[in-house]
Amino acid sequence: MTELLHHDPASHIAAFRADLEMGRPWTEALLAAIAIWDVAEEEIDGREYGYLIGGEAFDWLILAERLLDSVKPSLLPAADVEALLLDERWPQPMTEEAFEQALGASKYRAHLNFIYGVRVEEALQLTVEEEVRKERGNAAFRHDAAHEGDAFQRIYGATRTRLLHDFRVARGRAMLDRISLAELKEFTYWLFKRRVEQQDPARVASDTRRGLQRLNALEELKRRRLRAPASTSAAGAIIDCVAVPVG
């Protein structure tokens, strides 16, 4: 996705703020700002913001958080903003078609890359980790590093520790004893790409389907809790089980 480069975001933030001050509905102003955004990543007060993961996967929600945090709270409805950032729930229902039109074709394809490469991959990891727990008779909700390691071994053929080391070597990253949320998303997308490239296509499709089913189940639980329409974060049908080309 070549339009997300390393430009100065100040002009985009200023335009977003001006839209709000002129009375434009905040959701329209936000989507317009997201559509023209051309910054791949930032670091602000020690926090990493990765908007374009692996150069292909667009995390629109973290960008929305960045933009909304950049303006005066008095310009925004606090409850609606919280619902969007925490639950991906818009004040008014938004169809997937409307969301695609608002983002633009390229960013929307990159958004799908994020869904499959990060969200579905996380759901697959969770599914396999729970299988490991059940096999060993452990509590379903207790996190255990050994279970996580075994789940990664089953999915990717190596432990999480080994894979994280390889990822950081490939990216020229420092070998820290912690991982930021931004780096974790990038690592997850790297695992997705590795799985697609190295495994048999039939297994890739099967594992991706398992992850997608789990993600959809989690989305359904969230919708029941919120009693709200489906959010744009939910993935639809499987679409080739590979990263959607962008650019």
Image (tube, rainbow, N blue to C red):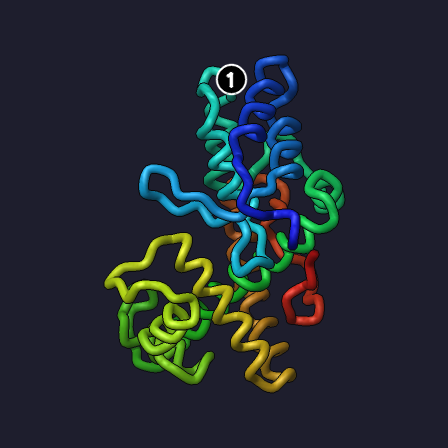
Q: Position of residue 43 (x, y in %)?
A: 39, 43
Q: What residue type is labelled 1?
A: Leu
**Quarter-of-image position of residue 30:** top right
Give the residue displayed 65% in from the left and 19% down from the top: 24
Q: Residue furthest top?
A: 22
**Quarter-of-image position of residue 142:** bottom left
- Seen in the picture, residue 12 relative to 105 is either above or below; the reply is above
Q: Position of residue 165 (x, y in %)?
A: 34, 73
Q: Mark 1 points at which residue?
A: 75
Q: Where is residue 116 in the image (x, y as percent from the top left)?
A: 59, 63
Give the residue displayed 51% in from the left and 21% down from the top: 76
Secondary structure beneath dot 1 equals helix
- Examine the rendering and report whether any part of residue 134 can be seen: no
Instruction: Indicate left or right for 3 with 10 as reference.
Output: right
Q: Residues within 10 Å of mark 1 (few under 14, many from 20)?
A: few
Give the residue displayed 69% in from the left and 58% down from the top: 246
- Examine the rendering and report whether any part of residue 56 can be seen: yes
- Seen in the picture, residue 76 relative to 170 is either above or below; the reply is above
Tag count: 1
Instruction: Indicate left or right for 87 with 180 as reference.
Output: right
Q: Where is residue 105 in the image (x, y as percent from the top left)?
A: 74, 49
